[in-house]
Amino acid sequence: MPPRISLIAALAANGVIGAGNALPWKLPEDLRHFKALTSGHPVVMGGNTWRSIARALPQRTNIVVTRDPAALPAGVLAAPDLAAALALAGASAGADEVFVIGGAQIYALALPLAERLYLTEIHADIEGDTCFPAIEYAHWAEIARSPQKSANGLEFDFAVYERRSTSATEAPQTPATP
């Protein structure tokens, strides 16, 4: 059975996920939530996300979609495209679920393939230069929501969505490798 493809992201009410290749907020609660969900599973990210993190995330197989694999340290896997990254992830430990962790381009490519979304929905418009792709919520069923309030007063929800059943002609397909 192929692994479940899940996207995990924190996004502001206006869809912002980043500013200057960094998170535009301080939410330690979200970072703990991210770690708890992704530990033990492969994570797939784009080059910009890798550069913003600048280290391998422990207890996870780290896979970076990049055209410059030589820039990655030992132990971090490189893939030329999303399809190759997902294939590597599927062969990794903890591959029952693969987490796509950003950035915007990788989210846009992976969203049609995703079966689950783990979203930290921040209840504020925040300035930034990078946004999560538009979500057609008619295709998603909310299965969990947990309201939160940060120590700094910022309100947000941890929300989980699952893709609604689709017909065979609408089922997500793995992208072809160019």
Image: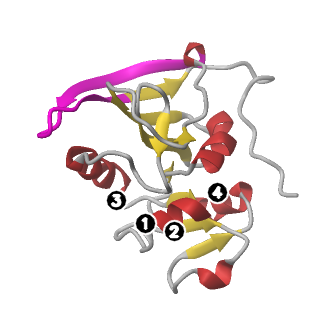
Question: What distance separates the C-alpha of mark 4 from that of mark 1?
Answer: 20 Å
Q: Which of marks 3 and 1 is nearer the N terminus?
A: 3
Q: What element carries label 1?
A: helix
Q: From what the image shows, is residue 38 above or below residue 92?
A: above
The answer for how far apart the CA atoms under marks 2 and 4 are is: 20 Å
146 to the left or right of 54: left
Query: In the rendered view, would you say 177 is above or below 110?
Result: below
Q: Main secondary structure of the magenta part?
A: strand
Kindly identify the amino acid type of the residue bearing the numbered disc 3: Ser
Nearest to the eye among marks 2 and 3: give it.
2
Q: Are marks 2 and 1 in contact (CB under 8 Å)?
A: yes
Residue at 49% x, 31% y is 15
Dot 2: element = helix
Q: Residue at left 14%, top 39%?
A: 152
Q: Position of residue 159 (x, y in %)?
A: 35, 28
Q: Nearer the viewer, residue 14 or 10?
A: 14
Name the mark nearer the viewer: 4 or 1. Answer: 1
Inspect the image, locate mark 2, and give the three-letter code of the amino acid beneath it: Arg
**Which span is picked out in magenta?**
139-159
Q: Sequence-wise, which precedes: disc 4 or disc 3?
A: 3
Q: Name the residue under label 2.
A: 51
